[in-house]
Image: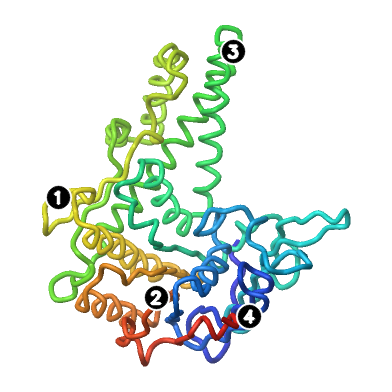
Amino acid sequence: MLKPLTRNKRYSFCVITKLRLYQFRNIDLLDLPITKKNIVLFGENGSGKTNILEAISLFSIGKGLRNESAYNMGNMASETKTGWSSTITLNENLKLQTNLEPQLDLSLKRTSKIQGENIRSHTHFSQWINVLWITPETDQLFLDPPAKRRKFVDRFVYAKDVLHLKRVINFESAMRQRLKLLKTQPKLNDEWLTALEQTIAEEGVALAFARHLLLEDLSKFQPRGKEQGILTPFTAKMDGPFEALLTMGSSLKIEEAFRQKLYENRARDQESGITLFGPHRSDLSVTHHMKGMNAFQCSTGEQKILLLAMIISFMEHVCFKNDQQLTVFLLDDAMAHLDEHHRFVLFHRLIANQDKNFQAWFSGTDRYLFNDLERSADFFYVPDLVGK
């Protein structure tokens, strides 16, 4: 059950009020007090802007925005090699911490804490905070392999439904076990195969519906008319042969159809070494309405606008429905490829939703790109923060 966050009288919403980093990347020690809903980190390339955003991203499910091992996040310039820590404080009264800590045997282990008490996994942070991001690498999303786009959608779903992670893990695990059995002992393990196929069907249909409903919400929850601007009208959906099953009726009927398809495909899957049918073969399809074309056909700037449109729609939809959890958006060098008009409209949407539980962290080399946030953001020159 979600533990209520004690409201500080200064805040009618949830917000990060302090960030503390120790021995993280190029940072020895950083104590950053936060007073606004928008935070701008600016400075020269290589000064550590992305490192600060990465430290916040570690409070999400997974390995953070760089998708890198915790063992590579320590301060390489330090002679002590005593690990690192990233700590955020919400509303000045709830402290969340993730670390790489020395153990009794002198090894280093990733640990996570809430109010100083150890928790089993950093996935428990999702009770209080969700983190989404756009980085320069995300700009390639519509040109990347389908697996990356599915993970992008799943990160949205995780923020709405923490059980989605368990579904994905169970689905992928059962799929691997089934392929292993098909390869080694298919005839001796028919009952086991049937049980695994039932698990794949149940978890697969559930995760497919979760993706479908999330993208349906994003497509519907868009300002219209004069407020469009950066929220370029779009339609987002999962596309593939599996999606045809979702129109068959009840979940039980769809699960049975999927299970039957897995049974019929045993020989083909055994020969190919992959599971040929399922939601893991589907792809994210985003249509730019004004252009009438798929996102992968759009320019780099148009693709970034579509990504930002999806994130802002998510902010306005999810933050409206759930006032307990803070959603943090990390926009690393996201102003690149955006003209002055689109920057203005993006900032306007953020300012217009200041009463919702979100916080936006920006990075960029030039301060002037964020002039429209002058009264609504904390500005930090990163070289001064990290001593460069």
Q: Earlier in the sequence, mark 2 or mark 3?
A: 3
Kind of residue at badge 3: Thr
Disc 4 designates what residue?
30
Q: Position of residue 310 (x, y in %)?
A: 30, 61
Kind of residue at badge 4: Leu
Disc 1 designates what residue?
293
Residue drawn 53% across and 65% down?
A: 54
**Disc 1 packing (10 Å; few <14; some 14–19; many ≥20):** few
**Disc 4 packing (10 Å; few <14; some 14–19; many ≥20):** some
Q: Earlier in the sequence, mark 4 or mark 2?
A: 4
Q: Earlier in the sequence, mark 1 or mark 4?
A: 4
Kind of residue at badge 1: Met
Q: Position of residue 371 (x, y in %)?
A: 32, 87
Of badges 1 and 4, the one in the foreground is: 4
Q: Residue furthest right?
A: 104
Q: Which element is circle 2 on?
A: strand
Color theme of the render: rainbow
